[in-house]
Image (cartoon, coloured by chain):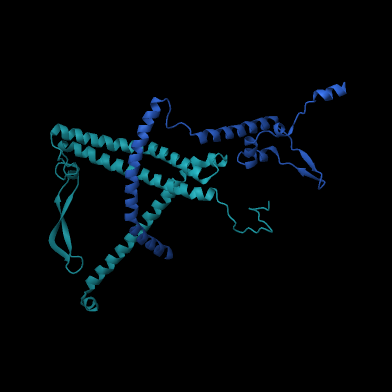
Chain colours: A cyan, B blue
Amino acid sequence: MFNLLLKLTENDKRMIFAILLIVILLFVLCGYIGMLIVRLMKWQGKKIDHLCHDVVVTKVITDKKHLLAYGKKKNWRLFFAQAVIPIIIMSAAIALLLIYDAVKHDFSYNPFDSEKGFGSLFFQFELTDQYVSWWIFALRTIRVSKYPTFSINNWCGYLFCPAMIVGGIWYLIVVGSFMARGIRLRKLCTSVFEKTLEGYNQNTGSPNNPII
Amino acid sequence: MTGFFVRFGKGILYVLVCPLFIVALAIVGAFGLLGFVAIFIKSIFLFFTGRSLKDDLLEDIKAKEILSNIEAKQEALMSSSIAPQTTVNLQDNKQIQEPEVEESLNPYTHDEIRIEQEPPIEQNTINVVEPTKEEEKQNV
């Protein structure tokens, strides 16, 4: 290892430093994205407070199990209401693809295909034989192998793929909020009916737990 | 600088946890799809029985009743504009100023709710003892 470091040229060392910096920045970026997701889920989880507020405050529900059952019902209902649109979008896309395949008598059609599908709208790259660096990661240069082309014959792929991507991401966001509400509900079940003896003295009492 | 390192550390943590989160999301997503289908079938059944998934649950109806009763009471008290009363505590011989109407009408105080749920005190305490026939004769 030490011998290898001695053999490195100044250029190689600069490259290592640059790669390390990029990796650190990538992790920091992941940290920001993760924090954003956590905050988003906490915000989504707060909706269960709104759903369960009245029944808890009016003491219609007075125990943990009842609140959990009620909260689950409410959570499923909200999930159903939120998931209707993305599921309709995805179902319509699948139905379109099936009809297209049935009409063409070709069930092997790939809507993501780079020639006859959605992939034709994007650049395609391939690795060349030229090496940027031979000793680390064997980095090679890339070149464009295919430029984007639009063909009206690929309409099924153009409709199917965006619909599935939009519907899928939308559905995953709805599932994430469903999970967040479930986690929040379980936390509420323990905190709302919590009886604590923290700071309580039976002889003196405390403001939160007065002597009966 | 410490914040930068904290984010870097969190980034590593999130990268490690990310696959688990994606797996959990996929499992819940698949489970959710089954649940969605079940609720959809249930909603069709409810539709043909004249009900809907948007109908309030039993708990919601009870809560709404309690809240509407409290609101009605509030409005009645506000319209009558009751002046703050004074009561004398005989034990301590002190005058206690009762809180004004606005303060005592917080819809979320437990005392108010308890009043709604319990029967009126008069029904429990007043016992009307009817005179027997012998007593009536004696009186005559």
Q: Is residue B94 above or below residue A34?
A: above
- Relative to residue A99, is residue A60 drawn left or right? right
Across the whole image, how many numbered discs are drawn on residues?
Answer: 0
Residue at figure coordinates x 18%, y 69% from the top left: A135
Whether residue B41 is visible, yes or no, is: yes
Q: On the rendered image, what quadrant is the N terminus of chain A found in?
A: bottom left
Q: Nearer the viewer, residue B117 or B85?
A: B117
Q: Quadrant of residue A22?
A: bottom left
List x then y, in percent, for residue B111: 65, 41
- Relative to residue A167, is residue A64 drawn left or right? right
List x then y, in percent, for residue B124: 70, 34
Q: Quadrant of residue A27?
A: bottom left
Q: Nearer the viewer, residue B98 or B57?
A: B57
List x then y, in percent, for residue A126: 15, 55
Whether residue A29 is visible, yes or no, is: no
Residue at figure coordinates x 67%, y 41% from the top left: B103
Q: Nearer the viewer, residue A8 or A82?
A: A82
Residue at figure coordinates x 76%, y 38% from the top left: B85
| Residue that lies at the very extreme toward the front in this rendered image | B134
List x then y, in percent, for residue A14: 26, 70
